[in-house]
Image (cartoon, rainbow, N blue to C red):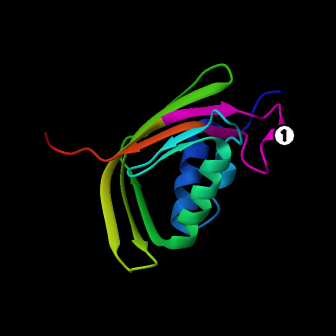
Amino acid sequence: MVSTERAAAVVREYYDALRDGAPLEPYFLRDESTVKFGISDSLFGGADVATALAEQTETTDNWTIESRHLVVTERNGFATFADEVTMAWTDTDGGDRNRFDSRWSGTLIDRSADASGRNGGPNWQFAQMHVSAPHEL
């Protein structure tokens, strides 16, 4: 079975989901090998990633995501991506506005042949994601 969803489209959909305050968990594999590194956290395992993303959605608002250089390469059943992203959001607990120029990279897996493992998510799901904020040395 060939996926009709392209990996780049799923990355852009993920950015839209952040902006819209939509659930983010469906974009990640529910697998113990799933890893997400954020600016201030390290998450190992699909369950931990899902829990943290649900909490993030509940405690943040007014996201802006500006992609400046999305590069996606698809191969046999997986894809890699990298991007430079300006992101900002409001912390709903304290009202603080956060803004970062960041770098994103990671790997997506094509799950189109395994609908049961997608948990209602897209055909392409993140297996790894790394978000970092560069700083001057």
Residue 71 showing in the rendered view: no
Asked whether 78 falls inside the magenta stretch, the response is no
Could you say where residue 64 lies in the image, as x and y percent from the top left? 42, 64
Could you say where residue 28 lies in the image, as x and y percent from the top left? 64, 45
Question: Among all residues in the image, which is located at the extreme right?
Answer: 116
Residue at left 67%, top 48%? 47
Number of numbered markers: 1
Could you say where residue 38 lies in the image, as x and y percent from the top left? 44, 48
Residue span colored magenta = 106-126
Q: Is residue 83 left or right of residue 80?
A: left
Question: Among all residues in the image, which is located at the extreme left?
Answer: 137
Asked whether 112 falls inside the magenta stretch, the response is yes
- Looking at the image, which is closer to me, 74 or 55? 55
Residue at left 79%, top 48%? 119
Q: Is residue 72 left or right of residue 84?
A: right
Q: Which residue is mark 1?
A: 115
Tell me which corner region of the image, top left, top right, bottom left or bottom right, holds residue 58: bottom right
